Image (tube, helix red, strand yellow):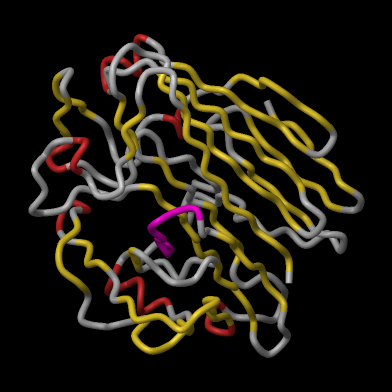
Amino acid sequence: MEIELRKGALRAGAVTHGGELVSFRDEEGTEYIWSGDPAYWSGRDPILFPIVGALKDGTVQTDRGPCHMARHGFARRMEFAPAEQGEDFVTFQLRDTPETLEQYPYPFRLRVTHRLTDRGFATAYEVTNTGDGPMPFCIGGHTAYRCPLYPGERFEDYSLVFDEREDAPSVAVRAGGLLGGTLEELYLMGTNKIALRHEIFDRADTLIFDGLRSNGVRLVNERTGRGVRVEFGQFPMLGIWTMPEKNAPYICIEPWQGCAACEDETGRFEDKPHAVVLAPGQSKTLAFTAEVL
C-alpha cells in the first residue's frame, strides 16, 4: 500500500512494504528519489535493520545463540503496519514475528516516521526492546537520490560537499562485503569535497566513513547550486554507494548506526562497531533529514 504525503506544494509517497519513502517531489515537480529501475538497482530507500551490511559467513553470535541474516537484515523485505498518519507524515510499525525470531532471537518494535518539512523530508527510526533481556541492534538508512536530477546533466557534474574539511580515509570493503583496513585513495583527507565519478565506485564499491566532523553533506551541481543536503549528524557512520560497473544514475547517502562485519571482529553482536544494546523496555531514536537546495 502506498500513502501520499502533502505539505504545501511538496509531495511524497511512502509504502508499507519495507516501510520506505519511495518518492519526494519539490514544488517544481522534480523527483529526488531513485525510481528503482531494476536495470540498475531495484532498491529505492531500504531500511537496514537489525544489521547493516554483511555478516561474516552470514552469522553473528549472541547470548541467545547465533543470528543468521542476509545482508542488511530483514526489515527491508517485510510488510509494515501504518500506526499513525497525517497529511504530511506517516509512521509505520514492524514487530517481531516467528520468522524474525528465527533469524534474530529478540522481541522488538521498530517505528519509522517519514515527515515532510518546509524544504524536504525527515526520516526517524525508533527501536524499542520489548523483550526481557539486553537486545543488540544496528540500523541504517539507504536512500538513493537521483543523480543527475535534471535533463542535460551528467553524474560527473555533481559533487558531495561536506560541512567541514575532513581527514577521514574510507574503510575498505573486502571479499564478501567484510570491512578491513582503508582504501589507498584517501577521499576526504584535507578536503570537504568528493567529485563524483563512476570509476570511484567501480574500484571501491562503497565509500564508508566513521566519525566525520560534518553533520551534513550536499549532493550538488556546483555550476547551478541545485541538489539536496542530507543531515546525518545523529549517526556515527556514513556510507556512499552506487552500483559498480553500471554507470547508474543515482547515489545513495546512507547514515549508519553500525556497519558490516570486520575481518578481525570477535563475532559477537555486542562487539560490532557502533552496535547499540538496549535494556528491556528501552528505546533509541535516530533521524536524518534531506533538504532541497
Is 44 situated above or below 161?
above
Q: Is residue 209 left or right of residue 82?
A: left
Is 250 situated above or below 150?
above
In this view of the protein, which residue sits in the foreground, 152 or 194? 194
Q: What residue do we see at 59% from left, 41% from top?
A: 124
Q: What residue do we see at 53% from left, 66% from top?
A: 215
* Quadrant housing residue 221: bottom right
Q: What residue do we see at 35% from left, 24% from top?
A: 279
Expressed as whole percent of the image width and height from the top left, the position of residue 36 reads 56, 49
Expressed as whole percent of the image width and height from the top left, the position of residue 190 reads 38, 89
Q: Is residue 7 left or right of residue 194?
A: right
* Quadrant housing residue 84: top right
Residue 279 shows up from this direction: yes
Name, please, the residue furthest toward the right. 8
Expressed as whole percent of the image width and height from the top left, the position of residue 212 reads 40, 69
Q: Quadrant of the C terminus?
A: bottom right
Instruction: Residue 237: say if magenta.
Output: yes
In this view of the protein, which residue sits in the foreground, 221 or 250? 221
Q: Quadrant of the N terminus?
A: top right
* Quadrant housing residue 83: top right
Q: Is residue 129 left or right of residue 226?
A: left
Expressed as whole percent of the image width and height from the top left, the position of residue 31 reads 73, 58
Q: What residue do we see at 44% from left, 25% from top?
A: 282
Residue 160 shows up from this direction: no
The magenta-colored residue range is: 234-242
Q: Count of labels shown?
A: 0
Instruction: Residue 177: say if magenta.
Output: no
In this view of the protein, which residue sits in the foreground, 288 or 27? 288
